[in-house]
Image: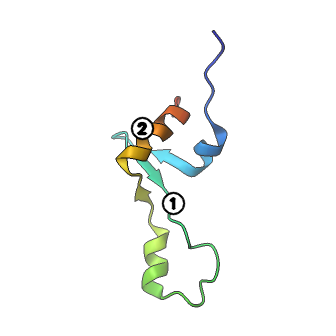
Amino acid sequence: MPKVKTHKGAAKRFRVTGSGKIMRDKAYGGHNTGKKSGKVKRSLREPAVLASGDAARVKRLLRHA
């Protein structure tokens, strides 16, 4: 049986919390920030919890995380 490897693309995008939830970064914060309000930019800084339907798929990719 070959070794099971972590999906490196997923490992760079997602983090696992101590309780087992998957955290992700929010989209739309990378550019065109001059026209976004400060409230929007502050909201984009905070990580978000991945939806439960997607979390099951990501956990398979992050087997060792």
Q: Is residue 62 visible?
A: no
Mark 1 neighbour density, 10 Å: few (under 14) some (14–19) many (20 or more): some
Find numbered disc 1 in the image and state the secondary structure of the residue it sits on: loop
Going by the image, does 21 lie left or right of 64? left
Going by the image, does 48 lie left or right of 1? left
Residue 11's tag is: none
Residue 64 at x, y percent in the picture: 53, 29
Above or below, comparing residue 18 to residue 40 in the picture: above
State the residue at coordinates (38%, 45%).
53
Outermost residue on the left side: it is: 19
Tag in front: 2 or 1: 2
Mark 2 or 1 closer to N-term? 1
Q: Quadrant of the N terminus?
A: top right
State the residue at coordinates (64%, 78%).
31
43 or 1, nearer to the observer: 1
Outermost residue on the front side: it is: 53
Above or below, comparing residue 25 to residue 41 in the picture: above
- Residue matched to label 1: 25
State the residue at coordinates (54%, 67%).
27
Residue 58 at x, y percent in the picture: 49, 40
Residue 52 at x, y percent in the picture: 36, 46
- Which amino acid type corresponds to the residue marked 1 in the rendered image? Asp
